[in-house]
């Protein structure tokens, strides 16, 4: 494992933290410490940090907003890198919007609205970065990033910056070719269509109202805990299995929307995981349908 002193020499004194609790960086509000937490303030520093981590054999993880992430209570033995704060620029060129990976999707959607561009209305309520969104092919209310992304700049494990076209990203339901690889999204370019700002705003307002009405936004969560199984809705299967309100400690199957596991305050990652596994088992026994978590895991879980 590389020392924090060596990393500070590369990334700067302020950019490297040791034993940083991850709970504050995840929307679940859980997670133990990462050995190292790094905020490179430029692409050059990001590349240098990655090269140093690789050379020293230090595992690393790229963090977006942590809105689809469950970090174990023991944390992560390696380096977590965040692109937020330093790589958040959004530029509009005609009908093309390019956002750096750390930009939040609601901000990107807002930039599109301001430019009178339609196509990102669905993303205005998704509380993640565009980098994490591309990895997950985030989507909602009948649309998804796949419909608008034309290309992405990616830093490959060998340190090369390449531009991948939409087809090469192989985007499908909550999946991209980059998922589970060591490639890092640097920026995403989307092709949108000219639209009426008032209508775009009205669609966003409507979708966000639907979210507020249906989703337990008052509690920590990672959105839908499970992927939608082919031919079913996870929330309906969970509700039919009588699991609404099932809880372990303060980790609950939301009573408002059974598709969400929520942290009602101080739940541990282990408790959230117990709820997830119980739900999977009961639904499998009752309906024969396996539920696959949409949530990504970081660290060790028993
Ligand atoms: C209240 C709520 C509502 C939600 N609603 C929706 C919804 O409607 N639709 C939907 O699709 N999702 C939804 N989500 C889930 C989540 O917001 C999305 O999956 C989002 O795309 C995750 O982005 P993130 O930046 O938080 O990624 P993170 O959770 O930080 O990371 C997710 C994965 O992406 C990887 N990653 C992140 N950034 C990069 C990068 N730059 N390069 C390489 N890998 C990277 C991480 O390593 C990790 O594997 C919701 C979540 C919450 C809490």
Image (cartoon, rainbow, N blue to C red):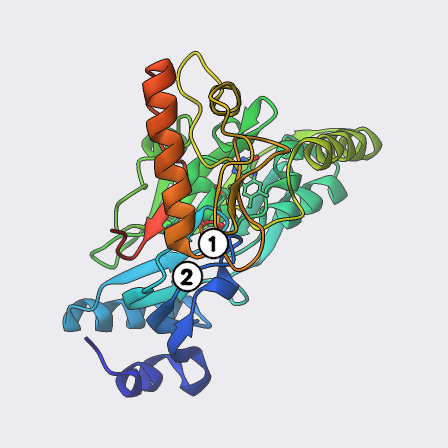
Determine the residue located farthest toward the top in the rendered image.
231
Q: Is residue 7 above or below residue 119?
A: below
Residue at numbered disc 2 = 31
Pick whichever of labels 1 and 2 is earlier in the sequence.
2
Marks 1 and 2: which is nearer the front?
2
Tell me where residue 82 sits by quadrant: bottom left
Q: Are marks 1 and 2 in contact (CB under 8 Å)?
A: yes
3D distance between C-alphas at marks 1 and 2: 11 Å
- Answer left or right for 253 relative to 173: right
Seen at 47% across and 29% down, the residue is 146
Label 1 lies in ligand 1 vicinity (Cβ under 8 Å): yes
Q: Position of residue 8 (x, y in %)?
A: 35, 84
Element carrying mark 2: loop
Q: Is residue 81 above or below residue 186?
A: below
Residue at the spot 51% in from the left edge and 35% down from the top edge: 224
- Locate residue 180: give its quadrant: top left
Please say if 46 is above or below 188: below
Task: Kindly tell me whether residue 157 is visible in this rendering.
Answer: yes
Residue 66 numbered mark, or none: 1
């Amino acid at each position: 494992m590389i020392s924090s002193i060596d990393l500070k020499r590369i990334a700067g004194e302020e950019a490297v933290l040791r034993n940083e609790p991850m709970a504050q960086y995840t929307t679940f509000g859980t997670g133990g410490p990462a050995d190292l937490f790094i905020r490179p303030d430029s692409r050059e520093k990001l590349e240098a940090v990655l090269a140093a981590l690789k050379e020293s054999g230090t595992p690393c993880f790229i963090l977006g907003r942590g809105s689809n992430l469950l970090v174990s209570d023991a944390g992560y033995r390696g380096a977590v890198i965040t692109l937020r704060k330093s790589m958040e620029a959004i530029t509009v060129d005609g009908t093309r919007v390019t956002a750096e990976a750390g930009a939040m999707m609601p901000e990107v959607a807002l930039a599109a609205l301001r430019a009178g561009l339609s196509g990102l209305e669905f993303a205005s309520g998704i509380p993640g970065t565009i980098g994490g969104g591309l990895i997950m092919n985030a989507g909602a209310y009948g649309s998804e990033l796949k419909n608008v992304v034309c290309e992405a700049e990616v830093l490959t494990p060998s340190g090369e910056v390449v531009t991948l076209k939409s087809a090469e990203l192989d985007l499908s339901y909550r999946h991209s070719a980059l998922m589970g690889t060591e490639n890092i999204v640097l920026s995403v370019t989307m092709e949108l269509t000219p639209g009426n700002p008032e209508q775009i705003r009205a669609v966003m307002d409507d979708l966000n109202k639907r979210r507020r009405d249906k989703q337990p936004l008052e509690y920590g969560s990672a959105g839908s805990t499970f992927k939608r199984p082919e031919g079913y809705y996870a929330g309906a299967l969970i509700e039919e299995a009588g699991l609404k309100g099932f809880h372990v400690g303060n980790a609950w199957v939301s009573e408002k929307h059974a598709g969400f596991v929520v942290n009602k305050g101080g739940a541990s990652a282990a408790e959230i995981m117990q709820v997830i596994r119980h739900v999977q088992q009961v639904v499998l026994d009752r309906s024969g349908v396996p539920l696959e978590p949409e949530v990504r895991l970081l660290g060790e879980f028993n």
